[in-house]
Image (tube, rainbow, N blue to C red):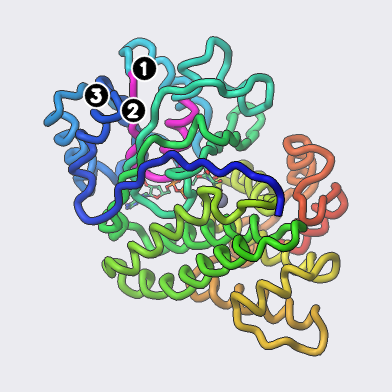
Amino acid sequence: MNNFTFCTPTEFVFGKGVETEVGKIVCRYGGTKVLLLYGGGSVLRSGLLARVEQALSAENIEFVHLGGVEPNPVDKKVYEGIDIVRSENVDFILPVGGGSVIDTAKAIAAGACYDGDFWDFFVGVAPVREALPVGVVLTIPAAGSEGSGNTVITKLDGLHKLSLRTDKVLRPRFAVMNPELTFTLPPYQTACGIADMMVHVMERYFTNTLHVEITDRICEGVLKAIITEAPKVMSNPCDYEARANIMWCGTMAHNGLCGVGREEDWASHFMEHEVSALYGVTHGAGLSAIVPAWLTWMVSHHADRVVQLAIRVFDVEEKDTPEATALEGISRLKSFWRSLGLPLNLHELGVENPDIDLLVDKLHENKGEFVGRYVCLNREQSREIFELAR
Ligand code: NZQ
Ligand code: ZN
């Protein structure tokens, strides 16, 4: 086991009706003037935004709005938010939505405390030293941004989708999580969220650090819980218990617990970020298109952990060869994702003619000569995986 520090300062307030407490919670964290951030309108249609406004007003907390954050959020909205924060003297950012809204909030929170261009953080020119406090009202279990120190933003100029990872500074102060708020999710978004959280676990499961049984078992437990609960939310979107389990799985998958004590991979995510940057697809669906190819490639290059995943998570009985066991595991993962209505390759994702040269170029331009840790992929190898994903 590698040395580690693990600090998750986020307060999770979870359960029915908890969004009505948000005013009191913002107060506790010292917020007096809030930037209310949201997406394309789901929170208006559901009445959630009005309830949040009411909760803030009840505590005499002022607020200003910034709506219209789009999935795969872009830098333009971040600049807009930074301007509002400065001109309105905002001291607290409250995203109401999913990963796109939360990530935009984090970038605004850091950018508003920095004299230079916030993009400097994403390209490694400057570290994030401070940020305004961010609290979250979560509406979709998927990206896990409510419990992570990460934010992912696309720079429109050149379509560079980059992630910024901080250990502590950008973790939300709190996350208000009412599973009932997820009842309105369209089935496709629910399924994409499920794929995303599964891959967050898998990126950490694929490691070369041996003898971290505790972290392995946590990963396997979260994956098994998702596999059990996912069909329930798909068949009955208003099944509170199943929605609650899936929502908490999404947080556990990405708050760092599943990676404690060892190195992590993340190649599939970096490859997907190029796909969603170029083709505007939903991140979770991009992952369900890329990951089967990544796993299949691994079977002939470094099969150990694919075999373990197959046996321990997908209950595959050991076959004559490790490769056969691994392939059966991949087949079961694909059947599971297929049953949720997810695409399993780029063609099914709607990307008929992927520009593989461009995907490879951008991947290595953004992430360096080698991508991933389980196997450090060079250009030729990442190209082979993109080709397999066609
Ligand atoms: O915009 P609105 O109208 O709110 O609709 C959203 C959006 O269209 C809709 N939605 C959300 N909650 C809903 C709802 N519709 C009905 N009822 C509800 N309760 O869902 C759509 C997707 O929302 P989005 O915020 O984009 O989803 P998600 O949470 O999957 O976030 C995706 C983004 O997060 C990044 C992804 O790359 C992508 O940009 N990621 C962020 C990570 C992080 N910060 O740690 C890690 C992830 O790996 C990921 O890369
Ligand atoms: Zn993800």
Q: Residue 366: which quarter of the image?
A: top right
Left/right placement of residue 329 relative to residue 177 reads right
x then y, percent, for residue 309: 66, 72
Label 1 secondary element: helix
At x 52% / y 14%, what residue is drawn? 114
Residue 376 placement (x, y as % from top left): 82, 50
Disc 1 from disc 3: Cα separation: 11 Å
Q: Indicate the quadrant where residue 147 lies.
A: top left
User: Is mark 2 in CB contact (under 8 Å) with mark 1?
Assistant: yes
In the image, residue 235 lies in the stretch drawn in magenta = no
Toward which corner of the image does residue 121 lie, by quadrant? top right
Q: Mark 1 or mark 3, which has the lower sequence index? A: 3
Mark 3 vs mark 2, CA separation in Å: 10 Å
Over which residues does the magenta segment extend?
91-108
Rendered image: mark on residue 84 = 1
Residue 110 picture location, percent across and down: 49, 23
Q: Quadrant of the C terminus?
A: bottom right
Q: Earlier in the sequence, mark 2 or mark 1?
A: 2
Residue at position x 51%, y 72% in the image: 224
Amino acid identity at mark 3: Phe
What residue occupies the far left of the structure in this picture? 58
Instruction: State yes or no: Cβ of the residue under disc 3 lies below 8 Å from any atom of ligand 1.
Output: no
Looking at the picture, does residue 57 appear above or below residue 255?
A: above
Q: Tell me if I can see residue 40 in this picture.
A: no
Q: Amino acid at mark 1?
A: Ile
Which residue is denoted by mark 3 in the rendering?
A: 63
Left/right placement of residue 223 relative to residue 204 reads left
The residue located at (28%, 53%) in the rendering is: 178
Q: Which residue is mark 2?
A: 66
